[in-house]
Image (cartoon, rainbow, N blue to C red):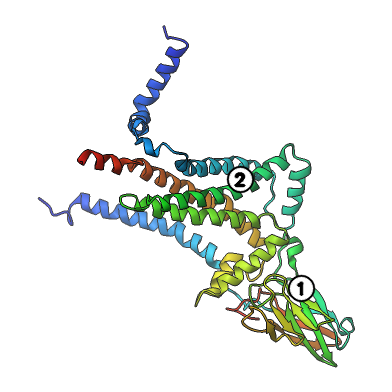
Amino acid sequence: MSTYGPGLIRSTLGWLEERAGLGGAIGPVMDHPVPRSTASWWYVFGSATLALFVLQIATGICLALVYVPSADGAYQSLLYLNFQAPFGWFLRAVHFWGSNAMVAIMTVHMIQVFLFGAHKYPRELTWIVGVFLFLCTLGMAFTGQILRWDQDAYWGLGIGASIASRAPGVGDTLVQVLLGGPIIAGRTLSRFFAVHVFLVPGILIGMIGLHLWLVLRQPRGQRLELDLESL
Amino acid sequence: MTPASQSRRGFLFRLGIFLNVLGAALVGVPVVGYVFGAARRRTDGQSWIELGKVERFPAGETRLATYKNPISVAWDGATAKVACWVRHIEGDRFQVFAVNCAHLGCPVRWFAQSRLFMCPCHGGAYYEDGSRASGPPPRGLFEYEYQVRDGVLWARGGQLPTLSRPV
């Protein structure tokens, strides 16, 4: 006879743990004590950025259920989203403000890490991956703005293409690859949709996993502890 | 003992690597060709475009003209339409300027009173003949080739003019 209530939950978790071993792998790191001086709000910005990223995924999937990534339908579908889809206006607004907040909070996170000297040995690699995460996030902000397909999007692309064209030697090729053709048109929007929804988020998720792995391998305050012990 | 280079295991291992590389190439070559195919041009991206009857552009004036992108697709929507500035000097003498500023591609606007093209983004300014007047643009306006045929003005365009590939 099987048990019910807390017993059932415990046996289910036990079944999972026996097979996946996640608790055994993560538990010690989560339980790892940190020095009192690092129990501070200054360390909240990395987690805050991650929370915003999860928010962007959730609202982004909702927007993609309605949004039409075609140059002749994108703007219409946004009007529908704003005025007809239930809570569409809200989800779109959250996605917009979430993206701004993610860039802002991530910048604060980067400044905090730098000012605390937390990018130094043994966490250089965490910093390097973080820099690429920062660039990818800026890329998400730019490509996301393109998807509105309004005047800002169109002329923003003109500026992006003009900047790309200044790359020595490969400028013209870069413009063509960026725009998906010789001029800003329907193929440009399809391209930016694919980059915004598939390519960069995939890279981001992979790199966040790596970033978190590195953070867990070099928990905060660890060096300090070792120094104290050696005294 | 047979050396690894001659053993059945070594052979199958190398065969496995070869098959994996082959599989990666079978997928990779079309993907790279597809993504970067946009950069390969069958033509130079330019074609002759009809801008309208010469009478639409009074001599001594500069007017905005729009045309349909010659390589548009059905779902381009409003972005199939491209604008350019037409300056009719006199008779068959014209100048056709791309709307894009030579600095960062923003749309310049013609101000008839001051006889200047001005860019809203960073304050680039051009004289009526398209030459640079002031501001960040490194050169004058991009200028299309033109023709007058049977009283109709044609220009040669179709791509976004940039510094690396001015029209």
Residue at image x 40%, y 55%? A128
**Mark linked to residue A120:** none
| Quarter of image, res B100 | bottom right
| Quarter of image, res B35 | bottom right
Residue at image x 74%, y 36%? A86
Residue A7 or residue A228, whichever sits in front:
A228
Element assignment for label 1? strand
Q: Position of residue A187 (x, y in %)?
A: 65, 62
| Subunit ID for the residue under disc 1 | B
- For the residue marked with disc 2, what is the amino acid? Gly
Q: Is residue A133 above or below residue B63?
A: above
Q: Position of residue B53 (x, y in %)?
A: 87, 82
- For the residue marked with disc 1, what is the amino acid? Ala
Q: Which residue bears the numbered disc 2?
A: A98
| Subunit ID for the residue under disc 2 | A
Does residue B163 appear to the left or right of B141 in the view shown? left
Residue at image x 47%, y 11%? A5
Does residue B73 appear to the left or right of B12 in the view shown? right
Does residue B25 appear to the left or right of A200 in the view shown? left
